[in-house]
Image: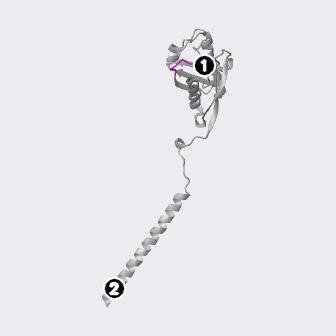
Amino acid sequence: MRAFKRVMGFLGRATLMVIVVATVTAIVTIWWFRRQAAQPTTVNAEVALPRGTRAIELYFPADDGSGLALETREVVEDQTEGETLVRTVVGALLDGPDGKTLAHTFPDGVTLQHVYRDPGGGLYLDFSPALRFGFKGGSTAEEMLVSSLLKTLAANVPGVSRVTITAGGQPIVSLAGHIRLDGPVLVSEWR
């Protein structure tokens, strides 16, 4: 009988220990999950979704020779800040017009290689060498290219006052011999 009481006492204590351990484990688990749920979650900026679209203004020469004509395009709003904005706007200009009554301003194969913006309003654009070697126009085509670029930048990139244009990292004296490009070009003179 004594052995029976010992076994029952042992089983009672073991059962009590199992119940206590299970209860403590459940309480700790519930506390941990509630604590995790209460902590604020952080959003990685690289994963942020686009906020919408925004219109950009592009200026292309009209086919009838009447000057520059406005064409608007929608771009993702996240592409409308800083260097990304400049690359988006100039890239759209390099792609050419959507309208059939407008002409391309840049020679085929020209790409924008580098962009640098200084705090004083200067913008440095380095195009591929195709700009220098692929340009085949005369004085009017040269004026339309420079005017199209500067008017488009002025309409879309706030704070730009002067633009320096290079090709392949080298200064361009002129594309067709009529407009000097070997230094900064003032945007205000081309509006």
Q: In this view of the protein, which residue sits in the foreground, 121 or 176?
A: 176
Residue 39 in view here = yes
Q: Which mark is residue 50?
A: none
Q: Residue furthest bottom?
A: 1
Q: How many marks?
A: 2
Q: Is residue 170 above or below residue 7?
A: above
Quadrant containing the N terminus is bottom left
> For residue 161: magenta?
no
Q: Residue at x 56, y 26 (%)?
A: 91
Relative image position of residue 112 (x, y in whole percent) = 53, 24
Q: Nearer the viewer, residue 66 or 174?
A: 66
Residue depicted at x 45% and y 68%? 25
Report crowding for label 1: few under 14, some 14 to 19, many 20 or more residues within 10 A (C-alpha). many
Q: Nearer the viewer, mark 2 or mark 1?
A: 1
> Could you tell whether 161 is left or right of 94 in the image?
right
At label 1, which amino acid type do we have?
Ala
Asked which secondary structure carries label 2, the reply is: helix
Q: CA distance from mark 2 to mark 1?
A: 101 Å
Residue 76 location, quadrant: top right
Considering every residue shown, the one lying at the far top of the view is 177
* Circles 2 and 1 in contact, beta carbons < 8 Å: no
The residue that disc 1 covers is 103
Q: Magenta region, mostly helix, strand or loop? A: loop
Amino acid carrying mark 2 in the image: Arg
Q: Which residues are magenta?
A: 106-110
The answer to which of marks 2 and 1 sits earlier in the sequence is 2
Residue beneath disc 2? 6
